[in-house]
Structures are given as structure tokens and as C-alpha cells.
Image (tube, grey):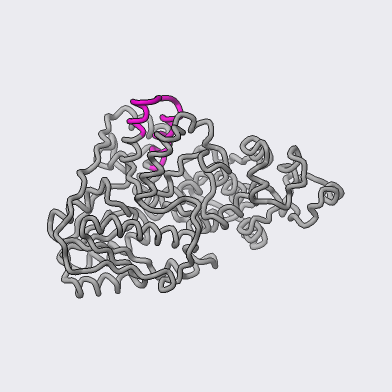
Amino acid sequence: MNLYLFQNDLRIHDHPLLKKAMDQGPVIGLFVFDAIWFKDNQFGFQKKSNHWLSFIYDTLLDLNKQLHTLNIPLLAKKGNFNDIIKTLISDYSIDSIYYEKLPGDEERKRYDFISTLNIPTYHEEMKPLCKSHLLPFSIQNLPFVFTQFRHQIERLYVDFKESEPLVPQSKITIESDIPNLNDLNILQTTHYIKPGESEGLKHLSQYLFSHQLAKTYKDTRNGMLDFNDSTKFSAYLSIGALSVRRIMNEVKKYELNYVKNDSTYWIYFELLWRDYFYFVHKKYDNRIFNQEGLAQYHHTSHNPHYITAWKEGKTGYPLIDANMRQLVQTGYMSNRGRQNVANFFTKFLNQDWRIGAALFEAYLIDYDVSSNTLNWLYNAGLGNDPRENRMFNYITQGERNDKNCKYLDAFLPELKKVPIHLKYKISELLEQERVSYGIQNYPRPIKKVTKS
């Protein structure tokens, strides 16, 4: 019996490693809800929020339906990973284990344990669009700046060929076993993005072909409120409900049949960023989790009041507060919002980027360890970015990307009576002005901008 360990590849389309496992004999699938996900991290909040856990759970329900068409049972277990693996090997006489070897400290601990079991293991790199062995340089010679990486990759011919469709295996007597939400201690959640491979494929088709939104993506991508401002592919990519090759192939079809422009290119451009962060992670390994990141030294001034205000969306800066409240309420935040709240936390408040990254890890339904960590380093000036002292203007950023303040109205309803031209300037208002607009209860700025 072959065991397939599902991780961030919760699909059956374009799945070469699952195909290899099936070619070698009967397969059962496993997904582990690790016990550490339900415990507090070093910063005092649960490692994984209910938003993320529930999104994964509903994706697994869909995966189970897809696997059922292939006669593959899916087992979902909660607990200590090592104990679960040992028990399954004994109970089902496992001959070999298949899994994608991903970068990450927690992932490595899993793989290290599996390597002690003296059972054959098989791997296949599936996450990046351009696989490691096709790069025009070694991982150790990866360019430090994204633009240099992009230019070299774009000169390559990359075949985005997907693996062959999977053929059902012969039926086996093992039944799927997925605990209910109560047993897993997960609350049912209404999702901002519909989870699962089926929904991911439907969304991809609708975004590109039914609604034809790709042609304007570059113009709308910085919007923060409307669902169709951005592709929303990230939630499906992060857990592998959509293959990155499937996305790229569908974009190519769209360009062939409808339009090829800067916006369609920009989708590819951002998939390259995803690849780049994956390769940077592979190159630097656990160094990316250090406080100083890829730099030599980094000083922060730990301030619990600042951290709490930021987490709760009570900083007194509307752009920051609206985005943080959206994150906690929905498990999602736009890319423009992420750049601003990370910049605010690290540059303006001078707090440890690892705290912010851990909060994103807990809540974001599209959390990806490489992209999340390296984006935080990027914003803190500790990663692959030569502009170390860049600081955003949190007033003009809001006014530029939320001209009618509909985003603020959605997540900061207490500011609805404030005139539009002043909403993003509340941090600069005098006390008598705050009283006149009835916003005495909205937080005062936790830290004032020093004007030269």
C-alpha cells in the first residue's frame, strides 16, 4: 500500500506525484491537522486561526469528493504528526510514502522523521511554475534582486505542460475518514473565497473567460474592497487547490483567444514573484526566519501597546485599522493593504517583523510560508530589496486606492459621518474637529508622525 501525504497540493488535476504513486499500486491519502496549529505560538496567539483551519477543512471535503472518483480514500487526522504516521504504517502495511518536499522548518521536521522509518519515499517538485532543474543558474547563484531573476527566466522557453489526467485505481476496502468540525475543534465559517479545487477551477474559468477580468487586472489590482479587483488565485495556489501550470495555461488561452496586454502579462509577472520567493527560501533556508532576515543587524523597540493596537485595528490610522479589521474578520487582505500594514508595523512602529508575519500566518487563508516571510522581510528592508528606508504615506496610499472611501465605510463604519476628503486624514485632526464629527471614540494615533 502506498501512502500519499497531502500538504499544499489539495487537488487531483495536474498532479504528477499522485500519478506516480498510483502507477506503483494502491494509494491512500493522508492529511494531518498538526496539533501545534491549535496551540499558542511564541507571541501569545493561536498559530492557526479558525479562518484558515476552516478553509483547509472545507477544501479537504472537496478533495475527498475528487479522490472518490479515483477510488482513493482520504484520511484526515489531528494530533502529533510522528505518532499518526507510525500508526498508519502499522495499520495499513505501508510500503512507500509520497510527498512533495517543501521548504520550511516545520515541513523539514516532518520529512526528517519520515526518513528515520526506513520506508522508501518519493518526491516531485510541483509548486513553482519554473522548476529548479530548469533554472539558468544554481539555487546558490540565485540573483539577489527580483528584476535580475525575472529577466533571466523570461529569456527561457518554459513548457507549462500539465501531467496526464489520473485514471481511477481498483477499489480497495479502506474507507475515507474525515472527522467532523466539532471533533477537530474548528468552527464552521462563511468564507470570503469559496474553498476547494472545484471552486478554484470554476473561479479561474469565470475570472478569465466569463467575466474577462484579466484584460484590466493591472488597473484594478491595487483596489482593496471589490472582490474582482484582483485575481484571488492566491488562496487556491497556497494550498494547491489550483495548479500554477493550470493557471498559466488558461492565461495563455485567454491571450490567444481574447487579448494579450500588460494586464495579462502582470498575472505572469506576479506568478514569477511567487517562484522567486520559493527559490530564495530554498537558498537561504531557515535564515529567512531570523530577526535580521537577510541583513546583518536589525534593531527594534518592543512596544506591547503598539503591537496590540496594530493587531486590533486601533492605531488611529484609518488605512491600517481597516485592513487589520478585515484580516481578523475575513482571513483576507489585499496586497496593497498587506504592503501598508507591514510597512507601518516595521518602519513606523519599529516592531519585530516576525510578530506581524506570525499574525498573517494565523489568519490569511492564502498563507504561504515563503511568500509571507519574504514579503515581510521585503517591507522591513531586511530581504531582497535595496530600498531599505522606504516608508509609505498612509494617508495618500488610502486616498489613492480608495477614492470614495467605500473600503473605510465597510470596515470602519464609525467614520461614516466624516467627510470623504478628511477620512484618511483623521490622524491629523485636532481634538475639536474630532468632536465635531462625532468620532471621539475612534482611537487617537498611537504614534504621531514627526514632521521636519
In the rendered view, tell whether residue 197 sits above or below residue 220. Answer: below
- 263 horizontally vs 302: left or right: left
Comparing 285 with 45, the one in front is 45
Asked if one can make out residue 286 in the rendered structure from this viewpoint, the answer is yes
Is-magenta flag for residue 311?
A: no
- 292 horizontally vs 17: left or right: right
**At which x and y percent is residue 262?**
45, 26
Residue 276 occupies quadrant = top left
In the rendered view, tell whether residue 300 sits above or below residue 433. Answer: below
> What predominant SS class does the magenta segment belong to?
helix
Number of on-image labels: 0
Asked if one can make out residue 144 in the rendered structure from this viewpoint, the answer is no
Comparing 204 with 10, the one in front is 204
Comparing 35 with 257, the one in front is 257
**At which x and y percent is residue 400?**
64, 35
In the rendered view, tell whether residue 29 sits above or below residue 249. Answer: below
**At which x and y percent is residue 310?**
63, 56
Segment colored magenta: 251-274
**At which x and y percent is residue 323?**
60, 49
Query: Could you tell me which residue is drawn at 20 percent across and 43 percent down?
Result: 164
Quarter of the N terminus within the rendering = bottom left
Comparing 257 with 332, the one in front is 257
Residue 104 occupies quadrant = bottom left
Quarter of the C terminus within the rendering = top right
In the rendered view, tell whether residue 162 sits above or below residue 8. Answer: above
Query: Could you tell me which residue is drawn at 60 percent across and 55 percent down?
Result: 351
